[in-house]
């Protein structure tokens, strides 16, 4: 296999691991489309990478692609519904002061 086949196997793992969060968040249209894109992209990359269970390096690279995404997600959690500008205890902004000319 050539180097780009191994690279395709790595990115196939990256695409395929993204199926899990889409399935965990329910069956909305966005999640179904996300699963289809991830599954389609992952399968296309596996085909491009000439993936075979007989090739241990291909298996290692698919798993490495998955592991990279899992490690990155663990180190940088995503909080989609948290507004970072307004918290429960923050005060509303003060109105701008008006300058009086005398």
Image: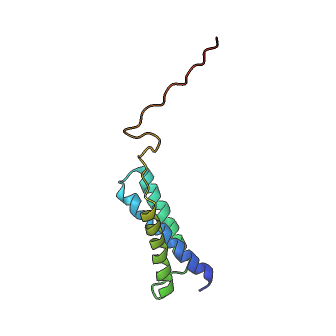
Q: Residue at x 40, y 60 (%)?
A: 21
The residue at 58%/77% (across/down) is: 7
The percent position of residue 86, horizontal first and vertical second, equals 44, 39
Q: Residue furthest right?
A: 101
Q: How many marks?
A: 0
Residue 94 place in picture, x, y as percent: 49, 28
- Furthest residue to the front? 102
Q: Is residue 3 above or below residue 99?
A: below
Figure colour scheme: rainbow
What residue is shown at x 46% (from left), y 56% (from top)? Answer: 33
> In front here: 91 or 42?
91
Q: Nearer the viewer, residue 95 or 60?
A: 95
Q: Is residue 71 above or below residue 52?
A: above
Identify the image quadrant of the C terminus: top right
5 vs 98: above or below: below
Quadrant position of the N terminus in the picture: bottom right
Observer-nearest of 42 and 63: 63
In front: 31, or 74?
A: 74
**Residue 80 in the image: x percent, y percent?**
43, 49
Residue at (42%, 52%) from the top-left corner?
Answer: 79
Q: Position of residue 2 (x, y in %)?
A: 62, 84
Extreme residue in the top direction: 102
């Amino acid at each position: 296999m050539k180097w780009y086949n191994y690279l395709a196997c790595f990115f196939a793992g990256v695409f395929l691991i993204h199926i899990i969060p889409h399935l965990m968040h329910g069956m909305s249209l966005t999640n179904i489309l996300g699963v289809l894109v991830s599954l389609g992209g992952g399968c296309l990359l596996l085909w491009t990478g000439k993936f075979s269970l007989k090739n241990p390096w291909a298996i290692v690279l698919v798993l490495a692609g998955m592991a990279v995404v899992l490690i990155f997600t663990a180190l940088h959690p995503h909080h989609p519904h948290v507004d970072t500008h307004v918290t429960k205890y923050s005060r509303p902004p003060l109105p701008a002061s008006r300058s009086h000319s005398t």
